[in-house]
């Protein structure tokens, strides 16, 4: 008599879902969701101004928001474009309080600075936002004006599994 062995196969993760319209985009995958404005305001023109704003616990109007399932967090990204054409991404992180279930301010900092792609006018930047372990989310961010100061950007998401 032979005893069979059965391998337990994990179900494949659900596919990444990308939804866009004229105003917003939503990308969901691996238990996380990224939402963003297709036309996002740029409220800051200097790194020091951006850094001071993200350090405060008050929520800022975000161009992109990541809602993570594990650990339960909300990460808001805000934009700054310097006179030199560098896109600086600030972030505010809020983590779910285990007692109240409310999201509380954890930290605010500069996530990264991106130089503009060469030979493009208006300025264009490629920004990486981690959606999950297996899925990369790339945002093409393009200035809506050809000169500085940049007051708004157009954002187009792209997912790479």
Image: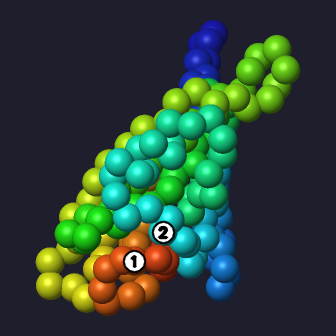
| Nearest to the observer: residue 91 or residue 149 | 149
Residue holding disc 1: 150
Q: CA distance from mark 1 to mark 2?
A: 7 Å
Question: On screen, 55 above or below 8?
Answer: below
- Residue 54 position, x and y percent, is 51, 43
**Which residue extends farthest right?**
100
| Viewport quadrant of the N terminus | top right
Per the image, the residue denoted by label 2 is: 42
Q: The C terminus lies in which quarter of the figure?
A: bottom left
In the displayed structure, does residue 9 sit left or right of residue 135? Answer: right
Q: Residue at x 56, y 78 (%)?
A: 39
Q: Given the current orientation, which residue lies at the most extreme left position? A: 118
User: Dividing the picture into quarters, in which one does residue 83 lie?
Assistant: bottom left
Residue 22 image-quadrant placement? bottom right
Q: How many marks?
A: 2
Q: Is residue 99 left or right of residue 65?
A: right
- Does residue 6 lie above or below 118 as drawn? above
Q: Is residue 133 visible?
A: no
Would you place residue 97 above or below residue 12 in this image? above
Residue at left offset 52%, top offset 30%: 107
Whether residue 40 is situated above or below residue 63 in the rendered picture: below
Residue under the point 57% across and 76% down: 38
Q: Residues within 10 Å of mark 2 (few under 14, many from 20)?
A: many
Residue 80 circle label? none
**Residue 99 at x, y percent in the picture:** 82, 14
Q: Using a 10 Å C-alpha cutoff, classify the residue at mark 1 as few (fewer than 14 neighbours), some (14 to 19) or many (20 or more).
A: many
Model colouring: rainbow
């Amino acid at each position: 008599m032979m005893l069979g062995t059965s391998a337990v196969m994990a179900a494949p993760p659900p596919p990444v879902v990308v939804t866009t319209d004229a105003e917003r985009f939503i990308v969901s995958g691996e238990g996380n969701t990224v939402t963003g404005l297709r036309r996002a305001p740029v409220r800051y023109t200097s790194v020091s101004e951006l850094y001071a704003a993200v350090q405060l616990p008050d929520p800022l109007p975000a161009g992109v928001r990541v809602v993570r399932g594990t650990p339960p967090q909300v990460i808001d990204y805000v934009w700054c474009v310097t006179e030199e054409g560098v896109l600086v991404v600030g972030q505010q992180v809020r983590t779910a309080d285990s007692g109240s279930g409310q999201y509380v301010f954890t930290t605010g900092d500069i996530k990264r600075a991106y130089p503009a792609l060469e030979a493009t006018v208006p300025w264009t930047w490629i920004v990486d936002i981690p959606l999950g372990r297996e899925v990369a989310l790339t945002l093409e961010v393009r200035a809506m004006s050809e000169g500085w100061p940049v007051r708004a950007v157009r954002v187009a998401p792209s997912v790479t599994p």
